[in-house]
Amino acid sequence: MYRDTWTNCYSSICSISFFNQLNQKIGSGTGFKVNNFLVTNNHVFQASGASSVELRFVNIDGNSTKFSKILSYQEFQGRLQTGMPEHSWDFAILSLNDTEFSTIPSLTLSDSSKIQIGGKIAVLGFQFDQTNLSIKQGLLSSKYTKAGVKYMQIDASVNHGNSGGPLINVDNNRVVGIVTRKHTGLTNAFDDLIKTFDNNIKVLNVAKGMMSMSGVDPVEALIVSQNQMKITSKEIQRSSNVGIGLAYELDQIKDFFDHL
């Protein structure tokens, strides 16, 4: 079943990588092709500090490159057709009218009502800045609406880099949602921890220079230590997983394609 989903869907999944002026990778996400458009999260599309973007599709091995194209970040932004911000439906739809993309197959969107709670789903994406595409299995564990936005909770691991990827109904290999993030419970705990480090650093900065031991300011050493722990906490937060992910239903995205 999941092998069939992989075979039918892998070639439509796009790795989106952002680079700064020094050609250093500063962020990544996932997208998928529908007709002549690229669908992803709006928070993936918004990449502060980016100078260029690589769009890359892979072969059936999930690793070797089938096609890639590098765009300036300005050109990438100029392809935006429509979208909604992260605090809303969090999607961006970009034009892929280039002839080079014509050989990339399209995924088919489906009404999210076609899959019920307990239905089998698959998540495809480029997690943890990896260059290889991965597929993960899971179940649709619940549906709910919050602030007018329709969410789908899944019991599949969602990691950094999975954002913007398709949520696939494995019964028909059609897209029923767009993956947005992992569950926020653990994320909120890490946010509180990082805020504590920030507050500690502010207090220590006020105390700098007030004392010295053998020519060394112990407060400076504490500031360095707090910053190191803050960096480590951010990396643990980025890499941690609670085995629960969230996706958005396709109401707004389908509305765009239905009116083409």
Image (tube, rainbow, N blue to C red):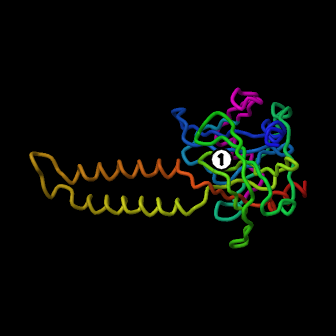
Residue 208 vs 130, above or below: the answer is below
Residue 121 left/right relative to 53: right
Q: Position of residue 246 (x, y in %)?
A: 67, 59
Residue 66 falls in image quadrant: top right
Query: Foreground residue, 13 or 87?
Result: 13
Q: Disc count in the image? A: 1
Identity of the residue drawn at 69% across and 43% down: 125
In the rendered image, which quarter contains the N terminus?
A: top right
Residue 67 drawn in magenta:
yes
Residue 65 drawn in magenta:
yes
User: Disc 1 marks which amino acid?
Assistant: Asn
Query: Foreground residue, 257 or 21?
Result: 257
Q: Position of residue 173 (x, y in %)?
A: 85, 47
The residue segment tinted magenta is 56-83
Residue 83 falls in image quadrant: bottom right
Q: Position of residue 39 (x, y in %)?
A: 76, 49
Identity of the residue drawn at 72% across and 68% down: 149
Identity of the residue drawn at 75% across and 59% down: 140
Query: Foreground residue, 72 or 24?
Result: 24
State the residue lying farthest toward the left. 214
Residue 5 falls in image quadrant: top right
Q: Residues within 10 Å of mark 1 (few under 14, many from 20)?
A: many
Q: Mark 1 — residue?
A: 162
Q: Which secondary structure lies at badge 1?
A: loop
